[in-house]
Structure formats: structure tokens, C-alpha cells
Image (cartoon, rainbow, N blue to C red):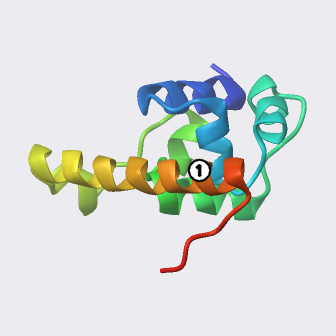
Amino acid sequence: MTFNERLKMERLRRNLTQTEMGLAMDMLQSQYSVIEKGTQSLTMDKLALLHNRLGVDLNYLITGNYTKLNYGLDKMPFSEIKKLNHEIFKELDKRINEYETGTKTQK
């Protein structure tokens, strides 16, 4: 499996659209799409956003082998993972709304 195929699998595993995945990396759906197709590469900054915002295992994306975590999700109860996912999707929904309406809400 190639990098771009693993990237797509990670997106699908999280039930995200290309638009949502792009928003998580501060890019448009069209920009994300060419990366998933393998015609462009991700920058280190975008890889960092994937990891920091969505918890994507960069070792898996690059090598196809998962990192054995010594912290975080592997030790977290399922209820906490669900809560974390809910917060991520809530933030993504907010960003999609801001993107579509051209407004930005104040924190």
C-alpha cells in the first residue's frame, strides 16, 4: 500500500470527507484531493497538522507500520476516545461552517 492509499484509509477510518480532512490541514478539498491521488506530496507542516489535530500515526503513513504508543489513545478508555472524537468533529463542523459562510466566530 502506498502513502496516498494509507492517507485515504486513515481518512475513511475517521469517517471524514476530503473537505473535512483538508480543513484539518488548513487546505481546500481540491488541494487535499491531489495529495490523496498521489500527484502531490504533503509538507512537513501538513503532516504535523494531521498528527496534532487528528492523531494520525505518521510512522504508519510513511512506512505502513504502526507506532506502539506509550501514551494517549491506547491507554484511554473508549468513552474518552468517543468524547475526543466528538470534540474533533464539533470543531470541524464549526470550521466548515466558517469556511462556507465566510465568517469566523470569536472564541
Residue 102: percent from the left, percent from the top?
Answer: 74, 58
Residue placed furthest toward the bottom: 107
Residue shown at 47%/51% (left/top)? 54
34 sits to left or right of 50 = right
Q: Nearer the viewer, residue 25 or 1?
A: 25
Residue placed furthest toward the top: 1
Q: Quadrant of residue 45?
A: bottom right
Residue shown at 50%/59% (left/top)? 53
85 sits to left or right of 44 = left
84 sits to left or right of 88 = left
64 relative to 20, above or below: above
Residue 27: percent from the left, percent from the top?
Answer: 76, 51
- The secondary element bearing badge 1 is classed as helix
93 relative to 102, above or below: above
Residue shown at 78%/45% (left/top)? 28
- Within-10-Å neighbours for mark 1: few <14, some 14–19, many 20+: some
Residue shown at 50%/51% (left/top)? 92
Residue placed furthest toward the right: 39
Is residue 62 in view? no
Q: Nearer the viewer, residue 41 or 105?
A: 105
Residue 95: percent from the left, percent from the top?
Answer: 58, 56
Residue behind mark 1: 97
Residue 72: percent from the left, percent from the top?
Answer: 26, 60
Is residue 73 in view? yes
The amino acid at mark 1 is Asn
